[in-house]
Amino acid sequence: MTLTNMVGVRCCFKLLYAIVVLILLHMNNPCIGCSERERQALLALKQGLVADFFDPFLSWGREAENKDCCEWDGVYCSNQTGHVVKLKLYGLQGKISPKLIELQHLEYLDLSENNFSRSQIPDFIGSLSNLRYLDLSLANFGGLIPYQLGNLRNLHSLDLSDQDYLSSSNLYWLPNLSRLKYLDLSFVNLSDVVGWLEAVNMLPKLTNLTLWDCNLPPPVISSISLLNSSKSLVHVDLHKNNLNSSIFQWLLGTQTNLVYLDLSENKLSGRIPETRFSKLSKLRFLDLSSNSLVLNFSFDWVPPFQLRQIRLGSCKMGPYFPKWLRTQKSYDWLDISDAGISDTIPTWFGDLRNKVEYMDSSHNQFRGNLRSELASYYLNVSWNQLEGPIPSILSTVSILDLSNNKFSGSASFLCTSTTEKSNLTYLDLSSNHVSGELPDCWINFQKLHFLDLSNNSLSRKIPTTMGNLISIRTLNLNNNRFVGELPSQLKNCIELIIIDVGENKLSGLIPEWLGENLLNLAIIILRSNQFYRSIPPQLCYLTQLQILDLSMNNISGTIPKCLNTLTTLAQKENSAVIMQHEFIIPMGELSATYWGYHDDATLTWKGARLKYKSTLELVKSIDLSSNKLSGEIPTEITYLVGLVSLNLSRNRLKGQIPSRLGNLQELDSLDLSRNQINGRIPTSLSQIYRIGYLDLSQNNLSGKIPIGTQLQTFDFAYGGNPLLCGEPLPRTCSEEEKGPRTTCVGE
């Protein structure tokens, strides 16, 4: 064969090969195009829905270039048949068209993260008999789950979670889904479903069961239900329900393949023997926290499992440190808080330092010293009896809570070479015996959000480098021995929401920069110091201020008249400032977790010192008591209609009580005692129906005490005002003392 012939043969072979490839490509062409019936069904679906933000319907149309629905966003077709087999739409609101049932080849339907305005899940979805995957979570459905979903006999995954207004009275339809492997009904109200366990038991292939926060009633355990129980479960999350300890009879007796088990925040109680866990060799995640269980394990017990996360907070397992933890070689999360342990931390426990990323052993009675080997990304050993100096443990830690122990010595551990570019986000050393001067190295803590050093014996001046805490939101230095002025560098901490330096020996003027620079401040506590001169009017710039405590200082001058510009205090609604903070903290090089804290504040309320935390957003208070303020109570204070507590006692105030003080309808506590206030008690005070504490004693008030639903119940409130008369005082009023009728608020 000549060279020319060989070239010709090769060219023919290449041409033939190309033709075969084109034929094969045509046979498997994914662009067959959807049927007209399915296209019309999708267009009908589009007509009932509107996009909230991202509009998936921009590619849906009737024109020639958009006619093939297989090219539309959120629509997926079979490469072989061209039928629509998958539909995924989110960010929509409106109504689901019944035309959806025309998509009879649909295998995957995801309508999660939409807003269907609490409408009922359409029962016609139960006619999509080929569905394998159905996700309607976070879609704001309401009403009852339609029993027609039981017709989806090919379903492998069902997710109806995160629907606050969705409920079910029974789950009789559920056992029909015999191929179901994944079930999530979290946040669906199942409080009336007595036989929920029987229904779940009849799903032979179920591997993942998530029913958290469903208000589930305690299960009815029978020998029949145990006999017919599915053995396939791998992941079980039933936390935050009303389950009792009978659930163990089912779970720990029959579910031998369990890897993940969460029963936290239920009503489990009683003793749990180690034999309950004898068949759970595959278990890796165990959460029994926030129950009332007693783990009755023998001292030398060796579990059959190797856990990765151990969450046993509030489970009693003391008084000795649980030795079985030593057998667990690879866990990274440990919560043994409130476990009734009264012991020292064993030396072998420090060997886990390279593995444990989260450790909470708070609210026990641990004794002895804290070792640096226990450092982790999250370390909470608060409310124990630990003592001695605090070791250098800040090299990796993000959250550190050492509060309410007996730690002593200096705070020098803060300034070690390993703290450069620290990831520390939360530091609580409060209520210990730490003493001496604070080290001046706060430039290393620019990620710090929360710092509480209160109730220690720290002294000397507040370091100027604290002005480098550019992320700080909560700064609490209360009840120490700090002296000098507030460093002006703190004006750089513009994220501050709470500053509490009360009960120290600070002096000087109240800084103007508090109001000029720290515009996010909601709580200012400077009580029990030696601040003097007047209240700077710049504090009136703080529109988010809800608590101002300047009591027990040497402040003089008058009360600023600009107080009516304090927007939050001038509104009856709850505070716009959120005292619950959440953020992401690193947990190793490649992982992170959400974590949060809730601010608290200790205030003088009705004559007593009280700590507020969960209700802190509701508290709106001004306390200027025990100073040297003079002049009259400004009428502008009557515009602060959101005030719940007002304390101006123990000053040198004169003049009359503002006639419109009764505008403060939210007042629960009012103390104007020990001043030089004269004149009559305004009738408007009788209109404050919520008032629970009133003290007007030791003034120069006169005339008749107004008749009101509350004013006659405060026997002690009027002492030291010899010219007052009327109930509840024994002195009756003359006609002259009764005075003219005064118009009440609202008349």
Image (tube, helix red, strand yellow):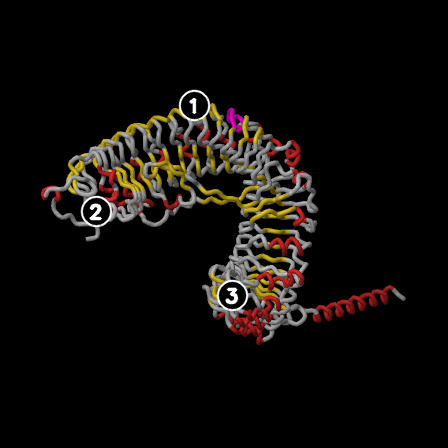
Q: Is residue 413 magenta?
A: yes
Labelled pair 3, 2 in contact (Cβ < 8 Å) = no
Q: Is residue 468 above or below residue 658?
A: above
Instruction: Tell me the distance, in whole angstroms, between the alpha carbons under discs 1 and 2.
Output: 48 Å
| Residue 654 appears anywhere in the view | no
Q: Is residue 305 above or below residue 395?
A: below
What segment carries the magenta color?
407-414
Q: Amino acid at mark 2?
A: Ser
455 or 217: nearer the viewer: 217
Mark 3: which secondary structure? loop
Position of 552 with respect to 116 (left or right) is: left
Q: Which mark is residue 257?
A: none
Mark 1: which secondary structure? strand
* Residue name at image x 26 percent, y 29 percent: 628
Q: Amino acid at mark 1?
A: Arg
At label 1, counting other C-alpha atoms closer than 10 Å, the crowd grade (few under 14, some 14-19, many 20 or more) is some
Q: Earlier in the sequence, mark 1 or mark 3?
A: 3
Q: Give residue 367's position: percent from left, percent from top.
A: 57, 31
Q: Earlier in the sequence, mark 3 or mark 2?
A: 3
Q: Give residue 28's position: percent from left, percent from top.
A: 70, 69
Q: Which residue is mark 1?
A: 460
Q: Earlier in the sequence, mark 1 or mark 2?
A: 1
398 or 85: nearer the viewer: 398
Position of 305 with respect to 536 (left or right) is: right
Instruction: Tell me the distance, in whole angstroms, between the alpha carbons under discs 3 and 2.
Output: 52 Å
Q: Nearer the viewer, mark 1 or mark 2?
A: 2
Q: Which mark is residue 169?
A: 3
Q: Which residue is mark 2?
A: 684
Of all residues, the one furthest to the left in this rendering is 736
